Image: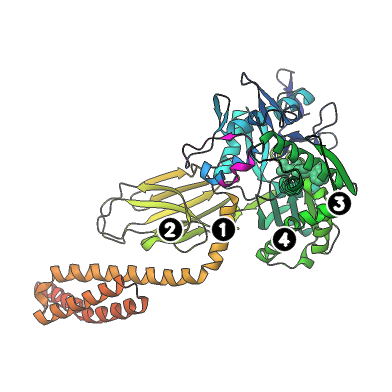
Amino acid sequence: MGKVAINIATGSLLQEETIVGIDLGTTNSLIAIVKTDTRQPLALRDIDGLALVPSIVHFDQNGNTTVGNPAKELLVAEPERTIYSVKRLMGKSYKDVSKDAGFFAYNIIDDDTDALVKIQVGQKFYSPIELSSYILKELKHRAEHILKTSVTKAVITVPAYFNDAQRQATRDAGRLAGLDVLRIINEPTAASLAYGLGAKQGTESTIAVYDLGGGTFDISILTISNGIFEVLSTNGDTYLGGDDMDRVLAQHWNKELGMPDSDKSAMQQLRITAEEAKKHLSGNDNFSGTINGKQVSITRQQFNELIQPLVDRTITACGNALRDAGLKKEQIDAVVMVGGSTRVPLVKNSVRDFFGREVHDELNPDEVVALGAAVQADILAGNNTEMLLLDVTPLSLGIETMGGLMDVLIPRNSKIPMKAGRQYTTQKDGQGGMRISVFQGERDLVQDNRKLAEFNLTGIPGMPAGMAKVEVSFLIDADGILKVSATELRSGVAQSIDVKPQYGLTDEEVEKMLLDSLTHAKDDIKTRALVEATTEAQQMLDVTEKFLTKHRAVLTDEEIELTNQRIQILQQAISDKDKDRIQQELEILNDISRPYAERVMDAALKDAMKGKKVI
Ligand code: ADP
Ligand code: MG
């Protein structure tokens, strides 16, 4: 349903291609477009009227794939050939997901814990990227069938907390499915776009987007003013969603049923019945059904009690997001409900009570993200010039400087796309290279943060220490992918890399890093002070020792002995890691050696004067 243009020269019709919006979800995926005639976003539906495609891939004995509902039906019968929740594995190593391995009924390969995970089905191995590409291919085919035109360009959404590796993996999955991924956008941003909130010129509003899906929870605070979206803060838990509700209900039932965890097929059936019950309870007060021939039942009241702790965790995160944004509940103008799990009455009521206002739930909560992606696609197609998007970085980005300190170039929650740069210099005379180590995290010492990449800037021409001017710049593009470059400004020597880490952080790790930065804030300040004092002292020692060898002649034996003594005391203070003593001794050594330096300068001056005739 793209634009139709006519080539004036040939008189032929040019079909301009529609750019589609795709929500590649943990549980469900779907595709949407903006209709040219109505200018409204629309989820594409099959002949049965269904828009959601379960994000499930089944492999038969020959390795042929089936995606969506037919695959979902095989979950119980063939758990080892039916892959679900693959989004949880995107951009992750086995180590990242090992603690959740029990959650997956299929086989995750664990031979190399640091490498990206692989999934074994029969004799074959698949990466999460490949598995996701099957889902995207299915969506592409579906759209082509419905639109009767080829579909090759897409906008795909990801959770706000997805890191570089996960975004890159999503982009790769798109490419593998034959899609040119024009933009990766955050799901809450897409949801706001779908509601068209604040899109009118001259309006400004602050919006909370509460997204509880099958596997992830995100709360985002956005402001929208004059059609410009800005994310003020994000918070959440990518291991919290409807799946967890299913799990607590399944565990509740299995206390009576006593089926062994090792019976994977029984576990799957338990899980599916639990989900069925949960959905039923969104509109009814009771559920009863059977699992392996045994009767199970649950009331909404009982269910609410089971899931209360999960809902409470989302509400706590809402408070944290508000705090990060520096806002009070009363300053929120609208609350948007996203994700199938927001259909649970307890969830909706809890969010409404927390924010003290009615929530937006007019659009299908499991479709809004795809609808928003379609709106973004429409903007990229040039059909909608009223809106602009800005996202934020979840963690600070910086490089390692002297003494292992983290020097932040782009602080956490910065808007992207974003560019930042800073100048550094060499520490040694004639230093020909400089190592640029890129880190992500909130701690003062790089060892507590996560290394993203490292490269050497080589070929810096020989210059005295401190003369070279190395400009390091960070560029985060609109997809949240980081490019780092370093240039020595005097010589023009340059080097750059795209940061595509081997595997990413789990969202839990991101949260842990943020939490650690708060709990360790005091320690960090202390350590930073110690590192700075040590670095300064070491430089002083270097200079002094050099001086002693070079200008021995201008010093008396006593002076040399005294200086060596103070050098030793300072070295002791350094190895004792005693910041105050380091600073004290540094002062003393400085006071002793300053007159020596003056003496050398005087001597040099006298030398210089010798050659001149004074009339
Ligand atoms: P994701 O974004 O993770 O792909 P969705 O937004 O599609 O997920 O939400 C999927 C979750 O919503 C599943 O856990 C599903 O069980 C739940 N869900 C769907 N419909 C209902 C309903 N009527 N009541 C409660 N939960 C529902
Ligand atoms: Mg979702």
Q: Residue 512 carries which label?
A: 1
Q: Which of marks 1 and 4 is nearer the N terminus?
A: 4
Q: Nearer the viewer, residue 76 or 451?
A: 76
**Quadrant the C terminus occupies:** bottom left
Q: Residue 556 carries which label?
A: none
Amino acid on which the number 4 mark rests in the picture: Cys
Q: Earlier in the sequence, mark 2 or mark 1?
A: 2
Asked whether, in this view, residue 107 is left or right of residue 400, the answer is: right
Asked if disc 2 and disc 4 are in contact, CB closer than 8 Å, the reply is: no
Amino acid on which the number 2 mark rests in the picture: Gln
Pointer 3 residue:
300
Write the start and end of the magenta stretch as one range.
Answer: 99-113
Distance in Å between CA atoms under marks 3 and 1: 34 Å
Residue 100 on the magenta span: yes
Using the rendered view, name the quadrant where residue 320 is placed: bottom right
Q: Quadrant of ligand 1?
A: top right
Q: Position of residue 191 (x, y in %)?
A: 75, 47
Q: Where is residue 443 in the image (x, y as percent from the top left)?
A: 49, 62
User: Comparing marks 2 and 1, which lies closer to the viewer?
Assistant: 1
User: Comparing marks 4 and 3, which lies closer to the viewer?
Assistant: 3
Pointer 2 residue:
447
Pointer 4 residue:
318
Distance in Å between CA atoms under marks 2 and 1: 15 Å
| Residue 52 appears in the rendering | yes
